[in-house]
Image (cartoon, rainbow, N blue to C red):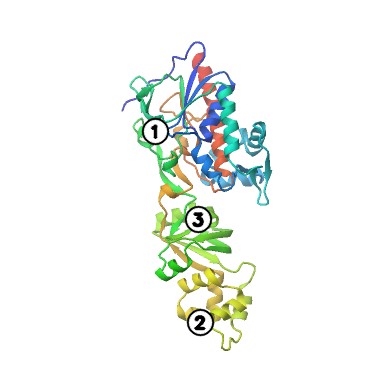
Amino acid sequence: MYTLPRMSSITPSIPAVAVIGGGPAGLMAAEVLSRSGVRVDVYDAMPSLGRKFLLAGVGGMNLTHAEPREQFVTRYGARRAYIAPLLDAFGPESLRDWVHGLGVETFVGSSGRVFPQEMKAAPLLRAWLHRLRAAGVQLHVRQRWLGWTEDGAPRFSTPQGEQRVHADAVVLALGGGSWARLGSDGAWVPLLEEHGVTIAPLRPSNCGFDVAWSEHFRERFAGQPVKPVVAYCRDAAGNEQGRQGEFVITATGVEGGLIYALSAYLRDAIAANGNATLLLDLAPGKDLQQLAAALAKPRGARSLANHLRRQTGIEGVKAGLLREVVSNEDYAEPPRLAAAIKALPLTLIAPRPLDEAISSAGGVCFEALDENLMLRALPGVFCAGEMLDWEAPTGGYLLSACFASGHAAGRGVLAWLAQAKS
C-alpha cells in the first residue's frame, strides 16, 4: 500500500493550508486558520461555494437548537462521545455569537430551533465569504479533488486541466453522499480507502421510506400531509422511540419531519429484518376506551366512513390510511378499529436512495482520527463535517456539528503546524 509522504517540510515563513470543500465545515476551518496568519486556499468542485448550505436554507435556515446541552448531545446517538467535545469547544451559543459577528441577527422559534432573522442562508453566506476574502483566504471553484501525487501534493481537475498545489497541511470537508448535484457525492471514499483509512459505508439519513401502497391510495393521497400524528418504532435495543408531528404521503411511501426524526431506527431495522414497522397514533389526545365507545354508538343510516368522521374526527388521508391497512373485518368492529386508530402498523420496506436523503450516515470512522481530527494514516490531513461517521436529526443538529468539526479541524491544523515547525 502506498503511504502518503509526511508533510513535514513546513514553509519557513507562512504555512499554506489547502481546505478542500467549501461548505460550512470547510469554511469554518478556513476562518480559524486565517485568523492565525496561515495562508489558506479553499477548493470546491462546484461553480460556487456552499450550495447545499444555501438549499438547506430555502425553507428557513435552521442553524442550531436552543435546548439544554444534556439533551442536545443525545441527538448524536452512538457518536455522542465523539461529537460532544467538539460542541464543548464551539457549541450552539458560540455559533450564534459567531453569526452575530457577521452582522446577522438570530432568534429562537417556538420549537427551540434557532434561525437567522431573515430566515435565509444567502445573506449569511455572502457576509461570511466577504470576511474570508478580506482576511486573505483564496477561494477556488470548479476544482475537483483527485487525491495526491506521489510526493504528497493535492491534485485537482480544473477547467485548465489537472493541477497540483503545495500545502503544508490539508483539511478535507467534502460532505457525505447525499445531494450529489450539490457536490456531496462521496467520490472521496476510494481516494481515502486506498491509503488505509477506515470508512463506514455511506447510508441515507433523514430520509423517506418506501411503502407498498395500493394504486388507489397512491393516486388519491400522494402529496397530502398527515397531521397531527404520533409515530412510534423500536430501536436496536428494543426501546420504544416516539415523536409527535406530521409527515407526507408520497407516490412511493412516506417522508417529512416526523419520518426523518425516526429514520435512523427505521433504516437499521430494515437492514436487520428486511422491513420496519412504524406505528401511527392517528388520534393523539384521545384514549383507546373513548374511541371504542364512540365508534360503538349506533350509526343508523350513516355510512361507516361518515360515522368514523362524526365520532372520531378521522377523515381524509387518515381515513384512507385506515382503509389501506386495516382488514374489512377489523374495520367493522369498533374495538379493533379503535385499536388501529391508536396504533396503525405501517410496513416500511426500504429507505429512499442515498442521493435523495437530506444527509448521510457513515464516513470516516473516528477511530481513524486523532483527538484533533487528523487522520492517523495520513499525518497533516484533517477531516471535518458530514464526511465523518456521525448522523443527527434535522433541527439544527446537522449544521451545529458541521460548524463545530470545522472549528476543531482548523485548531487541529494549527497545533500540528506548530509541532511540525518545532
Tell me the SS state at disc 2: loop
The residue under label 2 is 332
Tell me the SS state at disc 1: loop
Q: How far apart are marks 2 and 3 (CA)?
A: 33 Å
In this view of the protein, which residue sits in the foreground, 274 or 303? 303
Q: Residue 293's spot in the image, x, y percent?
A: 62, 80
Of the two numbered discs 2 and 3 on the same chain, state the one appearing first in sequence: 3
Can residue 159 be seen by looking at this rendering? yes
Q: How far apart are marks 1 and 3 (CA)?
A: 29 Å
| Residue type, numbered disc 3 | Asp
Instruction: Please tell me in which quadrant of the rendered image residue 115 appears.
Output: top right
Q: Residue 317's spot in the image, x, y percent?
A: 52, 68
Of the two numbered discs 2 and 1 on the same chain, state the one appearing first in sequence: 1
Label annotation for residue 235: 3
The residue under label 1 is 197
Q: Distance between the residues labelled 2 and 1?
A: 59 Å
The residue carrying pointer 1 sits among few (fewer than 14), some (14 to 19) or many (20 or more) residues within 10 Å by Cα, namely many
Q: Residue 160's spot in the image, x, y percent?
A: 36, 25
Q: Which residue is drawn at 32% across and 26% down?
A: 2
| Residue type, numbered disc 1 | Val
Above or below, comparing residue 319 to residue 333 in the picture: above
| Residue type, numbered disc 2 | Ala
Above or below, comparing residue 202 to residue 417 in the picture: below
Instruction: Please tell me in which quadrant of the rendered image residue 404 appears.
Output: top right
Tell me the SS state at disc 3: loop
Above or below, comparing residue 359 to residue 286 in the picture: above
In this view of the protein, which residue sits in the foreground, 346 or 319? 319
Quadrant location of the N terminus in the rendered image: top left
Q: How many labels does the image show?
A: 3
Extreme residue in the top direction: 12
